[in-house]
Structures are given as structure tokens and as C-alpha cells.
Amino acid sequence: MNDSYSDIDLAKYFAGELEPQEAERVENWSNISSENKEKFDAARFVWERTQNIELKNYDTEKALSRVHGKLDFEGSAVSRDRSFLYYLKVVSIAAVIFLPVLLFVYRQGKDTSKPVLYTEVTAKQNLRLVKLPDGTEVWLNANSTLYTPKEFNPQEYRLKLEGEAFFQVAHNHYRVFIVETSTSTVKVLGTAFNLRARKAEEKNILSVVDGKVLCTKANSDLEKVVEKGSEADVSVNSDVIEIKKLEDENFLSWKTGIMKFSLTPFREVAKTLEKHYQITFEIADTSLYNLPISTTLYATPVEKVVELLEMANDDIKISKTDKGFKVTRKQ
């Protein structure tokens, strides 16, 4: 891999003039270090800011040679203005002479002292789909809130989540996609994952469906990569991130409306129902913990679930309480 890429290489990348393999090498190079990333983003900053300047039939290599030579700006004011616009466009494509200046402008535009303003999106009782400007789709679970930035940031798309959401992230080489909770930070380039961050729970649960993500513990240097088919449990009260195989096939039941159980111990069924309906299922008799349950539920109201469980199992009785339901053994 190249140790460095020239401004003209980056210009050709943004112009779409590189072969796919070389373009991929440029992208990999840009992610090696913060210096590479800044140079890459600065070049893209130049490119994006000059797309409204129209040129026809330009030759990048010839134009670059002319830029490096002496530019004759003598003559009429109109002639000077036209020449300047012409060569500004060429330089934006070749990204050579003005890059240090525009890099300064770019850095100024990244003033971290400026507070980030967010737009609040809340799902109260029902599932809500949120489509983000970059093409990412977010499904919010009930009683969840997503905060999206109001202003464009060329380096990253940083959101905040309270509750639970499933993210289908649009792949974008130019910007990193980041989701923050009070306990963890999830950073991706393009993937699909579910993030559960309920305030009342002792851990955040990150479940990766596709791709891989970087999970970081808030206010800590602790971070781990979580790959497809894996789950990360991030402790709220300690610096612990536990990675394990994603075995709960019902972790997306809140989104799909489908819950499947095949000889599943009743204790595990109760946990799934608690997450799905956000209520409490108290099993008063511990002898019922391992009672096997086999059924499939399709967007079933909780009252109907209780009825079906009682009909399918002669040993249990389920009573409604203030917080949810209590399960006892029939006498």
C-alpha cells in the first residue's frame, strides 16, 4: 500500500478516475492515521465546495502543468476573473496549490467548541421508522428517543440514543457513523446492528447482524470489535464489555413482531416477553423455570400471549399485577 497519496491522486479519486482496486487502496490509506484522514477529508472539502464552477473539456494533467507554471492574470478584470475561476476549478480537481489554505479553512470549520445541536425523534407506544439523509434507516422501539445532528459534519455522523433501535447503516467511505448512549459508543462504516440502552437496565446490549463495529465504553479506554453474529454486553456500572455469540433469535422481535420458542425454558420465555412488551413476568414458583415452551407468536397482544400460554400448559396460572403478570403453578 502507498505510504502517501499526492493531491492529484486524491483528485482523481473524487473525480472517479481511479480503477476500483486503486480507489479501495486510497480508502484504506485514509483510515490508517488521523493525518491521512485529515488530508483525505480536506481534499474532499475542496472538491465539494467547487462543484458549482462549470468547466468543459478540461484535461487534468495538462491543467496541472499550467497551474504549476506561470499564470498570466494580467489584462482586463473580466479576463482575470474568468482565468481565476477556471484555474480554481482545475486546482479543485487536481487539489494542489490551494490545499494548505483550504486545509486551514477546513480545520476552522471543525471548531469543536461550537455546541452540536440535535433534532429529537421519539417513538412513544409504537415502532417508528426514521430515514436519515445519508440513506441509513433506523427503527425505533417504543419508548425510545433518537437525537440526530442538525448540521452536516464532513467527518462523522454522530447520533445519540435513549432506548432501543435497529440501525441499517448506509455504507459511506467518507464519514464514520457513530451512535452514543450514556454507557457506550458504537462506531461503524456500514453495517446492521441492534442497540438496546434502557436507563433502568444494568447493561447496554449491542447485537451485530451484518458487518462489524467498534464498541467503546463511555468515559473509558476500553473498546472491542464486535463482528457479525456476535453480541456485546456493556456494563453500566463497571468497565466491562463482554463479547459472546448471538444466540437469542428473538432479539429483534420488537421490530419483526415474531417470537419463536422451541422447547425453550419458561424462564427464558419470560425474559423475552419482558423485553418485548416492557412489562414484568414474575415466576413465583422456581420449579416452573425449566418448563419447556414451544410456540410461535406473530404480533400477538400480551393478553393473548397469556391466554395461549395457559391453554398450552396445564401446570401454570398467570395473573395480572400492577407491573405485569405473575406466574404460579396450578394447585
Image (cartoon, grey):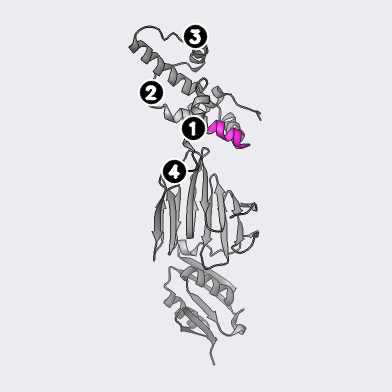
Disc 2 versus disc 4: nearer the observer: 2
Nearer to us in this view, 273 or 176: 176
Up-down: is 130 above or below 163? Answer: above
Which residue is label 2 attached to? Answer: 53
Q: Looking at the rendering, which quadrant does residue 205 occupy?
A: bottom right
Which secondary structure, mark 4?
loop
Q: Main secondary structure of the magenta part?
A: helix
Distance of label 4 from label 3 (alpha carbons) = 42 Å
Q: Is residue 140 magenta?
A: no
Res. 56 visible in picture = no
Mark nearer the N terminus (1 vs 2): 2
Distance from Cα at disc 1 to Cα at disc 2: 19 Å
Residue placed most toward the observer, 256 or 295: 256
| Residue highlighted by disc 3 | 70
Tell me the amino acid under the disc marked 2: Ile
Which disc number belongs to residue 134? 4
Q: Which residue matches tag 1?
A: 106
Q: CA distance from mark 2 to mark 3?
A: 22 Å
Of the numbered discs 1 and 4, the one sitting upstream in the chain is 1
Residue type, numbered disc 4: Asp
Q: Residue at x 60, y 54 (%)?
A: 219
Pick whichever of labels 4 and 3 is earlier in the sequence: 3
**On the rendered image, what quadrant is the C terminus found in?**
bottom right
Give the left or right position of residue 134, taking residue 224 as reference.
left
Q: Which residues are magenta?
A: 29-40
